[in-house]
Amino acid sequence: MNKTFPIKQEVIDKIKQDLAINTLAQASIRQIVQLVNELQNYSNIKFIRTEMGVPGLPASSLGVEAEINALKNGVASVYPPIEGVATLKQELSRFAQLFLNINISPEVCLPTVGAMQASIVGFIVANRRYRDKDTTLFIDPGFPVQKRQLGILGMKYKSFDIYDYRGDKLYDKLESYLKEGNISTFLYSNPNNPSWICFTEKELQIIGELADKYDVVVLEDLAYFGMDYRENYGLPGRPPFQPTVARYTDQYVLIFSGSKVFSYAGQRIGALLISDSLFHKSFPDLLDYFTTDKFGYAILQDAIYAFSAGTAHSSQLGLASMLKAANDGAYDFIEKTREYGKRSAAMKALFLENGFRIVYDKDEDRDLADGFYFTIAYPGLSGEELLGELLRYGISAITLDTTGSSRTEGLRICVSHTSSDRFNDLSERLQLFSQSRK
């Protein structure tokens, strides 16, 4: 009999109380991180950490070396241009053409302090284009903090879970909200955090068509760019290209991040890629809040300026170096991250062998990709109950309740910090858990 597991329930309850965690179902990612840290310290057990979506691969040396050189050359004493350094803007424009097959000018490529800043400045301008259109529609499940951003801004949102509305069903579902007349923006991630669904071309075309019909700005979060490993999206200038709504509408703001694709999360570097036509479009109601009625300049000269006055010089030059290598075909960033797909396939198999099922399992009629995340459930348990039990066996996760999912039986599993040397530990703990349910 294993003497380590299960961890006593009263121990978990005491730490939850100390951390003011009332319910695991609604606990934030950071609260779960704190809880597991405390459980590790108390029990001296190294958990299988799947709760937080942080890179599990080394940062690209291309970026690191470029930053070191930039700092040695004195950029630390100089304010960066808020519009971005010219080399980065040029490489972002090239990247969009070579990997997304869309043409945008360097002018409309704006570096940000990570994707988090990209989304909040997108909200703060896009949701003020019209006085009577003030609500974001989230195509869920999604990243909980983006809803928190709207709460901080005092802005409204609605949401629905796409689980039952894939393919052609998406059109009527979206339009049912749009007919109300108050939707200003859509937001979704593709590939999706937490479910890892990937929108099909049909679905992206529907979103683009309705964005045009109802004058909605699409905020497309590409934090996991190209990480649908069923296709090879890492060949510059050659199909297949990363799917994007930008091929179906000019009403788009793409949110790009260096965090996962280049394992560059610590340097907080991302970008907004805005269509040229939207960037230069005038919306008179913006003058209620900003010094200009031009969409792109309201983001750049007011929102970004007020939030951070730009993004660190060295981080911009680090990202520019990595993008240039990718654009030139000298750095296969997709092959570098493919390790996540391998981990996902192996970990899914272990969960399935022990009686679990995959919650989000299809993109229309196609099996879901193996990637950064997947979702699990266990018969007879809610997501909160399942998380509570897995913690007793040294496995962490987050519930789908916090992501806008209607599948409250599920958990999100992140594979990034479970390398192959932990697979035996995971297998043994899942077997113990499964045996305890019989």
Image: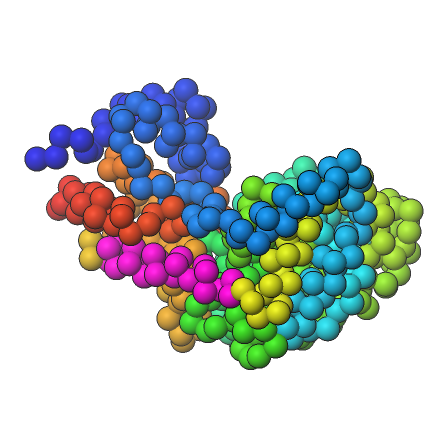
Front residue of 232/322: it is 322
Q: In this view, does 311 lie above or below 331?
A: above
Indicate left or right for 245 with 214 as reference: left
Query: Is residue 76 in sight in this rendering?
Result: yes
Front residue of 61/143: it is 61
Snapshot quadrant of residue 267: top right
Front residue of 90/308: it is 90
Residue at the farthest left position? 1
Q: How is the image coloured?
A: rainbow
Q: Is residue 38 above or below residue 236?
A: above
Snapshot quadrant of residue 215: bottom right
Within the magenta stretch, is there residue 212?
no
Q: Main secondary structure of the magenta part?
A: helix
Residue at the farthest bottom position? 239
Query: Is residue 169 in sight in this rendering?
Result: no
Indicate left or right for 3 with 138 as reference: left
Identify the residue at horizontal 75%, vertical 39% (top origin). Answer: 74
Indicate left or right for 107 with 152 as reference: right
Point out the stretch of residues depicted in magenta: 332-352
Q: Where is residue 261 in the image (x, y as percent from the top left)?
A: 53, 57
Snapshot quadrant of residue 9: top left
Identify the residue at horizontal 59%, vertical 73% (top origin). Answer: 236
Identify the residue at horizontal 34%, vertical 56% (top origin). Answer: 343
Q: Where is residue 386 in the image (x, y as percent from the top left)?
A: 30, 43
Quadrant the N terminus occupies? top left
Q: How many labels does the image show?
A: 0
Identify the residue at horizontal 19%, vertical 33% (top origin). Answer: 5
Front residue of 102/359: it is 102
Q: Position of residue 275 (x, y in %)?
A: 75, 66
Q: In this view, does 382 lie above or below 364?
A: above
